[in-house]
Amino acid sequence: MHMTRIEMHDGIEWRIDETPVDYPVAVDFMERRVAEIRAGTAPETVWLLEHPPLYTAGTSADEGDLLDPGRLPVYRTGRGGQYTYHGPGQRIAYVMLDLHRHGRDVRGFVAALEQWMIDVLDSFGVKGERRTGRVGIWVAQNGHEEKVAALGVRVRHWVTYHGVALNVSPDLQHFHGIVPCGISDHGVTSLARLGIEAKTDEVDAALMKAFPKAFPRRPTTRSA
């Protein structure tokens, strides 16, 4: 049976799933929750989950970057970005926040997502870094730079959705079916590849602990 654990922290609803959630189910929920947050009938929400193995194509996806079309299901999505892989061992955080409470600054929101991932990685002893012109969080290893976390967001009426995907211990071979985020000259890594064994509940705890620093809440400035 599929179970979602719900916790409230500082006015934000945290939804935690330990079994994979089908991608269309997740998108349907986010669409509804964004409308509810906008209407003031539901709290801001962060959803921690995994998906079954699949590819998603963002609004900038280039068909030529889908290298193995029959390998996995492909879902078109309204988030920004290009092709990415989702699957077991990758912890996804879908972040549904009202930016009226977080500065009404989309670039600032993306920067906060990046800093959140950097802080979480730091808690596992990994130095995550930004790179100009390359979305996501990167790890420098032996002269290589590899992506460990991907970002893809959408904003509707100042409410955010979609979010980030942290590679904990996914099957990295599935990334070979695409050009991840349109970047062909850099690889993809994971905490496991970096020699760090992290359980899902440990990753979730780190995500929850680091969140308030990255996303301090402000009084609402919503206009009529």
Image (cartoon, helix red, strand yellow):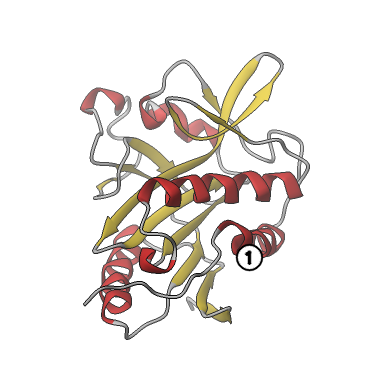
- Is residue 183 toward the left or the right of residue 125 in the image? left
The correct choice, above or below, for 12 with respect to 41 in the image is: above
26 above or below 195? below
**One can see residue 76 in this view:** yes
- Determine the image quadrant of residue 25: bottom left
Q: Which residue is situated farthest in the bottom direction here?
A: 41
Q: Residue at x 66, y 24 (%)?
A: 140
Q: Nearer the viewer, residue 50 or 78?
A: 78
Nearest the viewer among 190 and 47 is: 47
Residue 218 image position (x, y, % from top left): 49, 70
For label 1, the SS is: helix
Where on the picture, by quarter, is residue 144?
A: top right
Q: Give the image location of residue 164, x and y in percent.
A: 47, 50
Dot 1 alpha-carbon crowd within 10 angstroms: few under 14, some 14 to 19, many 20 or more: some
Residue at left offset 68%, top offset 34%: 193
Q: Is residue 53 visible?
A: no
Going by the numbered disc 1, the residue's amino acid type is Met
The residue sitting at 37% across, 61% down in the picture is 22
Q: Horizontal placement of 71 versus 113: left or right?
A: left
The quadrant in which the C terminus is found is: bottom left
Residue 190: give x, y in percent of width and height.
Answer: 62, 38
In percent of width and height, residue 128 lies at 64, 36
In the displayed structure, 40 sits above or below 140; it is below
Residue that carries the numbered disc 1 in the rendered image: 208
